Amino acid sequence: MAKIPLHFILNGEERAEFVDSGATLLRLLRDKTGDLTAKSGCLQGTCGTCTVLVDGAPRLSCITLAEDCDGADVETVAGLAAHGQLHPLQHAVMEHFAAQCGFCTPGMLMAAKALFLTNPRPSREDVVEALSGNICRCTGYEPIIQAVLSAAQVMSASGPGAA
Amino acid sequence: MEIRKKYFADERNDDLKEIGQSRQRSDALGHVKGITPFYADRAIPGLLHIRMVRSPHHHARILGIDASRAERHPGVRRVITARDVPHNVYTVLSLINIGPEDEPVLAFDKVRWQGEPIVCIVADSERAAYEAAQLVQIAYEELPAVFDVEEALKPGAPLVNEYHGQNYYRYDSGESRKVILGDVEKGFAEADFILEQRYQASPIEQAPTETTGCVVVPDQNNRFTCYTGTQAVFFTLDNSSVILQVPGQQLHFVGGTAGGGFGGKVDCTTEPIAILASMLTGRPVSYIYNRYEEMQISSPRAAERIYLKDGVMKDGRIVARQVRCYVDSGAYSRHTPYGTQKAAAHFPGPYTIPNVRIDCYCVYTNRTPSSAMRGFGVTIGDFALEVQMDKLARLIGMDPLEFRFVNAYRDGDMKAHHQPTEGAALIECMQEAAEWADWPVDPRCMAMSSREPRRQP
Ligand code: FES
Ligand code: FES
């Protein structure tokens, strides 16, 4: 099977890997880079546990071809805490008990981060819409919605560009 | 959170240290950093992958299995069939003396439900395993199948599970788990009204976001480490030890971190076969359900059919309750004989009724084996009971909450299981709920106490 060379940025660091033609971004992340934060809940684009950012947009990495990410800027939860400081979203999820089993949490966090990039002051409806592709079977969603709303408040209070 | 002082104040010292306090989860930091180690979250070089060949039929005799093309497929390391499994026929609850053993790890003579595993492919890649699974040829003779619990109990119904010899689990109390108090027929004869209703629930999939599975790594010294999402680590270790006929100390289970389970991860369906594959190949092996398998193959909450018959007086007292409950175990026992027993114990609900007759049947059908899910054996029964309570209240023209006050059990009341009630607090819970829900009830109800014996009429 043909191996394809890839250059991309992962959480701010330059990476180069060879991938099989047809391999997914999720496989690239988990099998090649050792970043295990994106989860495989369904491998068919229906649950959102594999959500990462590609060039700032949320992507289901289980149905994104790795070869399409050549030159891309990829972000995962592993890059969310900057300089050892938790991101306000991470704080808020802890405070609001928005992670129970924690399996959906990385995908939820990345979907929320993507929302903040385009919409730093989201309404409740905006949050629900942004998370609507991410399934959580434990929390009943309300604590997650509250966490995202409260993180948005914290971030807009600490000024633009905080995301 | 607030702790109400007005109930049972004399029974407590009010020196609680943890209750009433909010505490952070011990795993929250790992969750938000994405570093909580779920079973699949380990980089393991040389990992092999399992794919199962499963029955397309609900009920069929297996006439022959030809896996030779699969064995020759590039990337295939091993093909496992029933004869490779040291103790192939097992039942998970044999650990607590529930038998007979009634389920094969890999089917050999018959398949009893659609999706039953027959041949296990172990290959270098998931893709090779999928491809090889398509190449296995199995000849079947289809048999008549039964999908309905009451049909399954009729004479002449197809026999689902030969290890039982009949389509129900035989308890020491006979064909059903029974609870009997007083004389229901006498109660019905006295009653002002009688209401009989049928309630039917579907099987329910737990659908955790992380699918069922495990990763097994061979250690030195013939020891195997099994990273698993099971909710029942030691139980699964012990069952694996029985199935593989190896002492427990050869198995090292790492678990306790489940990406959701809700009862769906207690059945030991992936670990024994993945450990066996690792033993036979000397390689690390992963066996992970895909989402289709999680929804279709993993055991759901059992479907139940419940017949409730109540005799009630105009003043609100229920004087007789008869319950017939058929729990659909699917083709095998797993945890359902226990769930059915729980159902029997849970009826007739938190009410004091002088005449009770309960029969709960654990029935075998050609459906996916059922097992545990949050409050299994109890939840569906509660739904039926409480819908029935509303209907009874309507029948006699009484407020549904007041109707429950009249029947609520109190300290000292004889329960259907012949145990006196102790520590009841249902009345107080309903008083509090009535206030919160702004659902005014008669002052007579607000003056009741769980500690005062009910007035005998
Ligand atoms: S694993 Fe990608 S959407 Fe479910
Ligand atoms: S916390 Fe378990 S799925 Fe969301």
Image: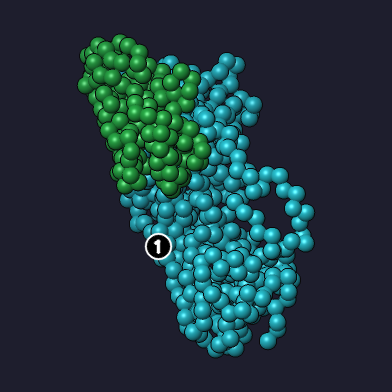
Q: Which residue is labeled 1 in the image?
A: B148
Q: Chain of mark 1?
A: B
Judge from the rendering whether residue B171 lies leftward or rightward of residue B57; answer left or right: right
Residue B420 image offset from top left, x and y in percent: 73, 68
Q: How many marks?
A: 1
Name the residue: 58% across, 79% down.
Answer: B442
* Residue at x 56%, y 61% (from the top left corner): B343
Quadrant hosting residue B13: bottom right
Query: Where is residue B23 shown, x and y percent of the image?
Result: 60, 40
Amino acid of disc 1: Asp
For the residue pair B324 and B291, the one nearer the viewer reads as B291
Q: Give the quarter of the image for residue A68.
A: top left
Query: Could you tell whether B43 is left or right of A15 in the image?
Result: right
The answer to whether one can see residue B131 in this image is no
Residue B43 higher or lower than B352, as above or below: above
SS at circle 1: loop
In the image, residue A71 lies at what x, y percent? 24, 15
Residue beneath the point at 48% across and 74% down:
B390
Q: Colour of chain A?
A: green
Q: Residue at x 40, y 41 (%)?
A: A149
Q: Which chain is cyan?
A: B
Q: Nearer the viewer, residue A32 or B307?
A: A32
User: To which quarter of the image does residue B405 belong?
Assistant: bottom right
Vertical placement of B402 versus B179: above or below? below
Q: Nearer the viewer, residue B121 or A48?
A: A48
